[in-house]
Image (cartoon, coloured by chain):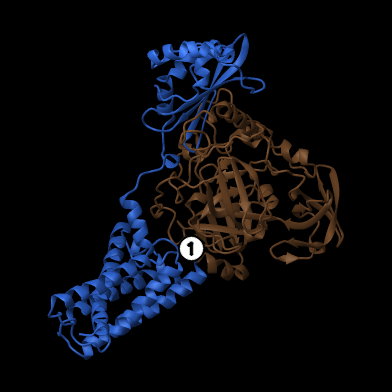
Chain colours: A blue, B brown
């Protein structure tokens, strides 16, 4: 068996699998939608009343050709019937390629619908290349004769290698594969996660920053709550040194130990104010004792410590 | 926002202000109509800067403001980088009192204003035409030249747009639902424009989405041109949105559309964003309207600021989010003004913003890059 012959033989199961896969995906799509009325792909080129029958015919043709390719692969229906089905597969992909080119021109927003709901991304050069490649593959199977198993292990290995390479090539040309892989390993980014504000407030009230500023806050109800990307901002009215102020919290939206930022601002100007001194509790008292003498060498450090050490620890995960 | 905890919404009274309805040639006037919105935008921006400024430097990698894509401006000024009405094309509204090949006179509420027309000035009233062909009494939206205070280079007369879900078709009239908080709109399709519209919107049947630009005549829109292309699915059978994994990119490319002012002050520079935080979301959601959109976008709120760049002209500026776009998020269409946008509608601009960024209203959309977290 020559290499060229082996490549031609591999096309038959590959084409059959593609056609049956496309047919199954379309049937699944119809079952989900309750009808064949959910039109994506080349059926969008047809008038509304023709789309449903066209979708059904396309599905039936794909299924029929896929089964036909398998049935006639090993000698049943040699020559004319087998060649007819293989030529039909080739023609189907040629027509599909032309239809996709037309669809891309007239409806650039529509997916190819080749694999039902999986093919919703707009038609790209890759989609067209895949369809053209399958048309060439179909043409390569015409006048091939029945498939024969290679007699040697090396022959089988070579056949599998060719099959694997072509599957890989089709995978690269298939936008559906990338989307499928994303779905498999999906973890929703925090920017897109719906986090209830009540949960954010509950988390905030357990934080040490809340405890530090709670004495200043004059209302149970926040003045303003808004969200940007992964942060939720909560503003409470407060009173500090006989001034109307506001405490602004920014809470990072994650389930455990979220980062909290806080600022005390003047209500009228929005200018940040010095934070009230808080009682610092060191996590490492021994380390603090060691650092004590060193800190006394620096008046600036002493002043900072006297003002409020927590002000220098603006990020908190200590809830 | 005082007292309005966890509740800001699309078309809040605090956002809409009062409709001015005057010829707004003065930039201060343009901004005055959106004072409430501007105040909230500025305040939230100021508070965000206050809460992040002293801490961003000390923050561990990955948890700082920058890591989250939030970048308080360096000067701390809440207005830095916003659209400057003195540098971008400005827009005025009014009724045409008189027009000649060189001069346009607009009036509203007893005020009259005179604009010189550039030699290249064109008008649109269902089709492109000479400005002198416009009629007295037409409602005009006029784009002023960026460097000429009273020089106009583009006029749209009686232009309107309806974007929504078809609820009923009766002969050549469509009833269109624009959302739970807006009145049902009527589109009348003229036989001469029906063919053109059906090229892009082949299914003018109840349940399908429609987006048509035309001539506003009393309470109906005379449909003239399709704004974009019709999604292939009915509004009730939205395809599953594509999944997004990893970090959401800071810049998102897609399509920007415009909407009629309705309750908004006409001169407001703002954008309706398709993914407001559901907790503080738009009245559409609160009214039990459609929640799920096609596009997955990072959650933001009223007052968040986007840098919007018109990829077709290169113009860009910071624009605050002033509302949500409950219908726009149902569209998985593409803008083809300059190449095919890789994504659907990422921003629904106010008229003034759309024009300021170099958009042509009759085209319906332009390709944009939206940068979030400015």
Point out residue A119 in the picture as x, y percentages from the top left corner.
37, 63
Q: Which image quarter is the C terminus of chain B in?
A: top right
Identify which residue is drawn at 44% across, 62% down. B232
Residue B30 in the image: above or below residue A52: above
Side of B271 relative to A179 (left or right): right
Q: Chain of mark 1?
A: A
In front here: A287 or A205?
A: A287
Side of B26 relative to A305 (left or right): right
Side of B373 relative to B109 (left or right): left
In front here: B275 or A200?
A: A200
Residue A305 in the image: above or below residue A165: above
Q: Is residue A281 visible to the viewer in this orientation of the structure? A: no
User: Disc 1 designates what residue?
Assistant: A109
Residue B192 in the image: above or below residue A91: above
Q: Report which quarter residue A9 is drawn in.
A: bottom left
Q: Is residue A94 visible to the viewer in this orientation of the structure? A: yes
Point out residue B5 in the picture as x, y percentages from the top left corner.
52, 25
In front here: B351 or A247?
A: A247
Q: Which image quarter is the N terminus of chain B in?
A: top right
Side of A302 relative to B148 (left or right): left
Identify which residue is drawn at 72% across, 38% down. B31
Identify which residue is drawn at 49% across, 14% down. A294
Mark 1 secondary-structure assignment: loop
């Amino acid at each position: 068996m020559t290499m060229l012959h082996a490549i031609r033989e591999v096309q038959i199961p590959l084409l059959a699998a593609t056609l049956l896969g496309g047919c199954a995906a379309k049937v699944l799509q119809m079952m989900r939608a309750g009808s064949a009325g959910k039109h994506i792909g080349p059926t969008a080129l047809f008038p509304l009343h023709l789309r449903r029958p066209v979708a059904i015919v396309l599905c039936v043709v794909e299924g029929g050709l896929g089964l036909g390719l398998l049935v006639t692969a090993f000698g049943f229906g040699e020559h004319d019937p087998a060649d007819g089905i293989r030529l039909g597969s080739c023609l189907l992909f040629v027509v599909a390629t032309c239809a996709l080119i037309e669809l891309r021109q007239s409806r650039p927003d529509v997916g190819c619908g080749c694999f039902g709901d999986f093919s919703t991304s707009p038609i790209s050069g890759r989609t067209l290349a895949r369809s053209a490649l399958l048309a060439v593959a179909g043409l390569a199977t015409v006048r091939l004769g029945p498939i024969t198993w290679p007699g040697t292990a090396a022959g089988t290995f070579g056949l599998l290698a060719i099959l694997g390479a072509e599957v890989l090539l089709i995978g690269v040309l298939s936008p559906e594969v990338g989307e499928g892989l994303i779905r498999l390993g999906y973890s929703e980014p925090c920017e897109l996660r719906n986090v209830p504000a009540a949960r954010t407030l509950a988390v905030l009230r357990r934080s040490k920053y809340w405890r530090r500023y709670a004495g200043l806050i004059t209302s149970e109800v926040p003045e303003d709550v808004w969200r940007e990307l992964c942060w939720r901002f909560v503003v409470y009215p407060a009173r500090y040194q006989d001034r109307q102020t506001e405490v602004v919290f920014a809470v990072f939206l994650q389930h455990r130990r979220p980062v909290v930022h806080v600022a005390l601002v003047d209500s009228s100007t929005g200018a940040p104010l010095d934070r009230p001194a808080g009682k610092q509790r060191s996590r490492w008292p021994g380390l603090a004792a060691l650092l004590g003498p060193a800190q006394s060498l620096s008046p600036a450090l002493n002043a900072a410590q006297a003002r409020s050490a927590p002000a220098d620890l603006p990020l908190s995960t200590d809830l | 926002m005082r007292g309005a905890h966890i509740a800001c919404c699309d078309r809040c009274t605090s956002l809409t202000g009062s409709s001015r309805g005057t010829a707004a040639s003065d930039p201060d006037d343009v901004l005055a109509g959106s004072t409430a919105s501007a105040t909230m935008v500025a305040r939230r921006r100021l508070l965000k800067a206050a809460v992040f400024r002293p801490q961003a430097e000390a923050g561990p990698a990955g948890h700082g403001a920058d890591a989250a894509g939030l970048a308080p401006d360096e000067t701390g000024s809440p207005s830095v980088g916003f659209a400057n009405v003195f540098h971008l094309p400005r827009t005025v509204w009014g009724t045409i009192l008189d027009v000649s090949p060189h001069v346009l006179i607009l009036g509203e509420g007893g005020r009259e204003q005179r604009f010189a027309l550039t030699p290249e000035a064109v008008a649109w009233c269902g089709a492109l035409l000479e400005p002198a062909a416009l009629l007295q009494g037409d409602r005009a939206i006029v784009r002023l030249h960026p460097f000429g205070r009273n020089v106009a280079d583009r006029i749209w007369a009686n232009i309107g747009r309806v974007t929504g879900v078809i609820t009923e078709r009766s002969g050549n009239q469509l009833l269109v639902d624009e959302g739970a908080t807006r009145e049902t709109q009527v589109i009348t399709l003229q036989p001469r424009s029906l063919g053109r519209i059906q090229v892009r919107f082949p299914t003018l049947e109840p349940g399908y989405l429609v987006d048509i630009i035309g001539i506003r005549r009393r309470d109906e829109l005379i449909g003239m041109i399709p704004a974009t292309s019709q999604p292939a699915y009915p509004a009730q059978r939205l395809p599953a949105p594509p999944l997004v994994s990893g970090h959401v990119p800071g810049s998102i490319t897609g399509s920007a559309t415009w909407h009629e002012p309705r309750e908004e002050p006409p001169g407001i520079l703002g954008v309706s964003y398709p993914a407001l935080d559901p907790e503080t979301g738009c009245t559409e959601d609160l009214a039990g309207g459609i929640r799920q959109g096609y596009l997955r976008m990072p959650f933001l709120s009223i007052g968040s600021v986007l840098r919007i760049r018109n990829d077709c002209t290169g113009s860009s500026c910071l624009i605050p989010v002033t509302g949500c776009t409950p219908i726009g998020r149902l569209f998985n269409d593409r803008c083809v003004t300059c190449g095919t946008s890789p994504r659907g509608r990422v921003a629904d601009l106010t008229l003034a913003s759309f024009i300021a960024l170099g958009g042509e209203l009759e085209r319906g959309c332009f390709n944009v890059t939206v940068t979030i977290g400015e």
